[in-house]
Image: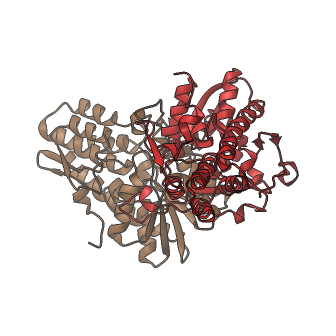
Chain colours: A red, B brown
Amino acid sequence: MSTALEPHEILRLDGDRVVLLDQRLLPGEIAWVECRKAAEVAEAIRTMVVRGAPAIGIAAAYGYALAARRGEDLAEAARVLAASRPTAVNLAWALAEVAGAADPAAKARQIHDDEVERCRRMGAHGADLLAPGALVLTHCNAGGLATGGYGSAVGMIRAGWERGLVEHVLVDETRPLLQGARLTAFELSELGIPHTVIADSAAASLMARGEVDCVVTGADRIAANGDTANKIGTYSLAVAAAHHGLPLYVVAPTSTIDPDTSDGGGIPIEERDPAEVTERFPARNPAFDVTPAELIEAIVTEEGVHRAPFEQSLPRVVHA
Amino acid sequence: MSTALEPHEILRLDGDRVVLLDQRLLPGEIAWVECRKAAEVAEAIRTMVVRGAPAIGIAAAYGYALAARRGEDLAEAARVLAASRPTAVNLAWALAEVAGAADPAAKARQIHDDEVERCRRMGAHGADLLAPGALVLTHCNAGGLATGGYGSAVGMIRAGWERGLVEHVLVDETRPLLQGARLTAFELSELGIPHTVIADSAAASLMARGEVDCVVTGADRIAANGDTANKIGTYSLAVAAAHHGLPLYVVAPTSTIDPDTSDGGGIPIEERDPAEVTERFPARNPAFDVTPAELIEAIVTEEGVHRAPFEQSLPRVVHA
């Protein structure tokens, strides 16, 4: 196999079901979860059958379309879907898009197609930032699995690889749920892109050894000033990258930008079950952190490469 | 139980056996490994039945004493024990100490007693650095399990707790082998010290949130200029601590200081089996990293608190 999973393999609306690839079982097992009502889609989002900000937006849109098809209470369906996870703004954005549509199913599919197309454009813009021989470090999974196809950060890496610019990718394993070691390594392996998984805590020391040229991540929500919420550990990488004079590139579609949140202080950070870290002793499990705009070299969206001051440079996004 | 494991429970020479608490099984199971010749002790060190720089020095000394008792080839025993792990200098130091002794068994027990006594003195010196209400973050396990009893970094925390200065301890889980989540949390739990385990990658964001006052770690080898090798991830914490204006305190006995290595560039870094990170995809597993002296606020030994320039301030250690 020379390509990663196709968009319809990752998630789709199929008659009276939303079918989601169960990302919790990857890469060991390829299996799908079938949801027959909106609340089941919400539960699948909450339990991370599907994850990644753009992908959960698409899943929520499909869930809403399913509710419409079944004649469920649409206000309630939207409420339950929107509440499934708090940090990504794509959920609210996608639900607003689909709620206003005459044909919610067609609209949901269009959102899915658009997100994948946005990834291709982000990939092309992002690859312009890479020099030949690029040693890229990435965190979590901002690949096709996270975006419904192609990928945001992985899309940039993929486009850079296709242009012959990417030499090697270091993949943070991304504790506690190991999205890097399970999902990003799987996607890069499918794409034939050379990669090495490392413990998250090894990233800074590999920067010090000269084994990283740039850090590329996705985003779960970008505030109006460029402050970016992303998987826990992104902030640690941002601090380390700045210490070593390396650029951090955030790659995310405009659906991830939240114009109504002025800065990172306003982004709700999901605290997940501490048992994901350890069941035996007291633990905490913040799922995301906020990287301040000043540690971000550029934000790449489908509209181009945006640099500080981000208040001026980020695309104007109007959320319904 | 109100105290952590006693020194003789962690490791001891017992007749014709060296008995080691199997730290790989903690905290789920308390079991001991019996070694009947020096090569078996070396294998136990290599496979991390016993780990932590001072503890592996003690274990090697006991292994040498066992070889002497059994009439093994002592030069070969010393060679095999010294080669079991490359980074900690305590191995070479302890072997040189015991090789010159008339009664190797008595000398090995004295090294063990001395290391625990050094920890108590380090704890007292280190606690002087803490202010009331201290929020401490630690990495890996520099507790009694790592030192043969009492602990270095955990010893400082323990002494600070007994003085009423420590409010809470954040414990990095410490991938890939989870010494923090398994061993440090276990020890703090036994000691009744409030603690919370976090993913390693969450540390920097909790610093940004004001939930850390200082970082306290052990060391596997300290170069003459103060550059310090310690568990992978320590350097990442050091960079993050510096970014947030927080002190990093390294707590280690003088047996960890290597006067023959001028700086961190000369410290061999062990690369362990990548399968400890992931078995499915290519991976790398450096077990240690080097934190440059300029990121270390103070090094605490049994002789006191040492500050930059460390070339002048560190105790003069003569390795045989």
Quadrant in which residue A70 is drawn: bottom right
* Left or right: residue A132 compared with residue B256: right
Which quadrant: the C terminus of chain A? bottom right
* Left or right: residue B71 compared with residue B216: left
Which one is in front, B221 or B192? Answer: B192
Identify whether B151 is placed above or below A313.
Answer: below
Which one is in front, A288 or B216? Answer: A288
Q: Please report the residue visible at 46 percent of the width from the left and 65 percent of the height from the top.
A: B196
* Left or right: residue A18 compared with residue B25: right
Locate residue B299, reporting x and y percent. 53, 57
Which one is in front, A83 or B226? Answer: A83
Locate residue A140, reporting x and y percent. 57, 44
Identify whether A116 is placed above or below A39.
Answer: above
Q: Please report the residue visible at 45 percent of the width from the left and 78 percent of the height from the top.
A: B163
Locate residue B85, reporting x and y percent. 37, 37
Q: Is residue B232 visible?
A: yes
Locate residue A3, reporting x and y percent. 57, 25
Q: Please report the residue visible at 82 percent of the width from the left and 43 percent of the height from the top.
A: A306
